[in-house]
Amino acid sequence: MAEQPDEIKKLVTVATDLAYPAKVRIETIESIGRIGTHDALLALLTLVANEQLTKKERELALKHAGKIVKAGH
């Protein structure tokens, strides 16, 4: 279980690295959303608050965060 937060941290690093194309960052945000844990929820909310990301990326992170909340995490 301790590996999962490290995996999420790595994914957040990719999702916030503006050197990567937007497509890669979007796919990474979707991957975090699929994890569906409380740690993933917190990571997604961090992405929502990141003003350097595009509006589309932030909205996608919010959408996935909402799904996790609805699922009860």
Image (tube, helix red, strand yellow):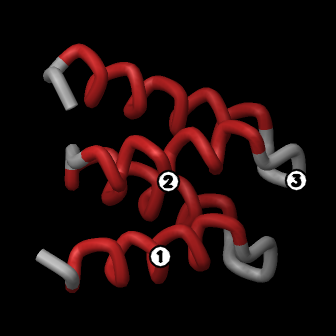
Q: Is residue 55 above or below residue 29?
A: above
Q: Residue at x 38, y 32 (%)?
A: 64
Tell me the distance, in whole angstroms, between the alpha carbons under discs 2 and 3: 15 Å
Q: Earlier in the sequence, mark 2 or mark 1?
A: 1
Q: Residue furthest front?
A: 2
Image spot of residue 20 (x, y percent)? 69, 78
In space, the residues marked 3 and 1 are separated at their CA atoms by 18 Å
Of labels 3 and 1, earlier in sequence is 1
Residue 21 vertical placement versus 64 (above, below):
below
Name the mark on residue 9.
1
Residue occupying image coordinates x 58% and y 63% = 25
Q: Is residue 56 above or below residue 52?
A: above
Q: How many marks?
A: 3
Residue 21 drawn above or below residue 58: below
Amino acid type of disc 2? Ala
Residue 4 locus on image (x, y percent): 23, 74
Which sits earlier in the primary sequence, circle 2 or circle 3?
2
Q: Using the image as rendered, state which of residue 4 and residue 11 is in the foreground.
A: 4
Residue 46, given in percent of the width and then of the height, sits at 63, 48
Mark pair 2, 1: CA separation:
8 Å
Q: Residues within 10 Å of mark 2 (few under 14, many from 20)?
A: many
Q: Tell me, for residue 51, which label it has, or none.
A: none
Image quadrant in which the N terminus is located: bottom left
Tell me the kind of residue under disc 1: Lys
Write down the residue under mark 3: 52
Q: Amino acid at mark 3?
A: Gln
Q: Are marks 2 and 1 in contact (CB under 8 Å)?
A: yes
